[in-house]
Image: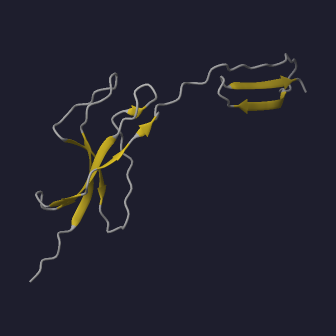
Amino acid sequence: MTRAPPAVLHYEVLRRVDPLPAGAATPAKLDGWDFVAAVPAHGDNIYSVVVPTLADSTIAQGMHWSVFLVRAATATPLTFFDSPPDSGYSVDNLAPAPPSGLALEADCWRGTRQPRATSISSRCTARPVQLWARARSC
């Protein structure tokens, strides 16, 4: 009599602990692999999860790969199924710097009526962002 395979309860994503490039933040290190996420199993054919890498790949520091594996966990702690390790990397996922070079140009007005904005524009280029608005009396 053949046994049915144990039911998978969830999938765990593990990231291998590798040396970091100089200057990168150092997380708490454990031997081997760090647990980074879990996804409940519902019998779907495809699962997706976003997990962090340990460092960004940059021109100055070079390519930094992070190695992951997925473990299908069952109700029995010592019964699980591991995927082969695979790699990924992130490139500059840091928050952008706040915009600079902002200016507001407005004509003076008098009276009780609000000025009417005649033009508002935004231009994003490699140079500092220029945002401007001009208002005139009605």
Q: Quadrant of residue 129?
A: top right
Residue located at (78% from left, 19% from top): 105
Instruction: Say how many tags the image has.
Output: 0
- Which of the image's four quarters has the N terminus? bottom left
Q: Is residue 126 left or right of residue 16?
A: right
Q: Quadrant of residue 20?
A: top left
Residue located at (42% from left, 33% from top): 57
Question: 41 or 89, which lies in front?
Answer: 89
Q: Looking at the image, which residue sits at the far bottom?
A: 1
* Vertical arrangement, residue 69 with respect to residue 122, above or below: below
Q: Quadrant of residue 102?
A: top right
Q: Is residue 114 left or right of residue 88?
A: right
| Residue 66 x, y percent position in the rendering | 32, 41
- Which of the image's four quarters has the C terminus? top right
Q: Looking at the image, which residue sits at the far left?
A: 1
Question: 39 or 22, which lies in front?
Answer: 22
Q: Is residue 34 left or right of residue 111?
A: left
Residue located at (25% from left, 55% from top): 84
